[in-house]
Amino acid sequence: MRILIAEDERDLNDLITQRLIQEHYSVDSCYDGEEALDFLRMADYDALILDIMMPRLDGLSVLRTLRENKNDVAVLLLTAKDSIEDRVKGLDAGADDYLIKPFAFEELSARLRVLLRTPQQKQNELRVADLCLSLDTRQVTRGGRAITLSSKEYTLLCYMMRNAGIVLTRERLEQHVWNYDFTGASNVIDVYIRHLRKKIDDGFETKLIHTIRGHGYVLREPS
């Protein structure tokens, strides 16, 4: 999952960024509203953590611009204002949730997990056939057997399971797993798909990761 953090308090921005990276998210960060809109025009994000009080363009103005442009990215507002009026303004502008400063990172993480749930996902786990991924514990099993994944392997598998049955291009996979700082090889997705296949499919009769030649990859249970 790819997250954008727009927060002008640099220490807080850096802290959230590092903690989310540890939780296997791909993270970009910026420090003012105009820069946030630039990031959002250049890439698709799964969620935006948006501070209200920012220079150049405040968070509510950023939010209104997004919604006017039909951008439905999940938005978690950060605010130092705890009045009901301020919270209502944020929700009316199109925010999905809000968090009042100061806050515990654990609460931010939990609220983010809720925002990222798909409509079909009632619990904090993803399942495709006998493959299960827990979003709370980050444990992955197949047929009850534990599978150990690296941080990037976990992030890639999580994104593919959230989009099970959908053919994903290499470019789309790379955009959601790596941030703008990534400077790796052009075949990085193919390399990580090979790693996942060895861990997810080897030893199982039913293969879940499939190559769609000329298009990309799809994770699905064969019909």
Image (tube, rainbow, N blue to C red):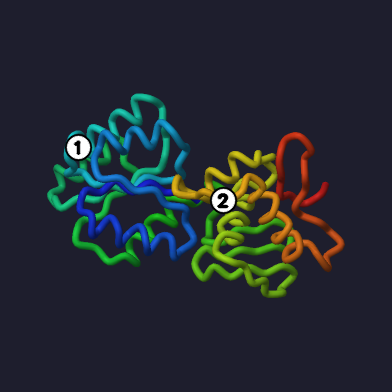
Identity of the amino acid at label 2? Answer: Gly
Q: Give the camera-side residue of 92 and 56.
A: 56
Mark whose residue sits in front, 1 or 2 = 2
Residue 98 x %, y %: 28, 50
Q: Earlier in the sequence, mark 1 or mark 2?
A: 1
As drawn, 168 above or below 7: above
Q: Which residue is mark 2?
A: 184
Q: Residue most toward the top?
A: 69
Residue occupying the point 81% across, 49% down: 222
Residue occupying the point 83% across, 65% down: 204
Q: Residue most toward the right?
A: 205
* SS category of the residue bearing label 1: loop
Near mark 2 (Cα within 10 A), the count class, few <14, some 14-19 or many ≥20, is few
Q: Would you identify the image quadrant in which residue 64 lies?
A: top left
Residue 165 x %, y %: 70, 44
Residue 31 x %, y %: 25, 45
Q: Which residue is mark 1?
A: 58
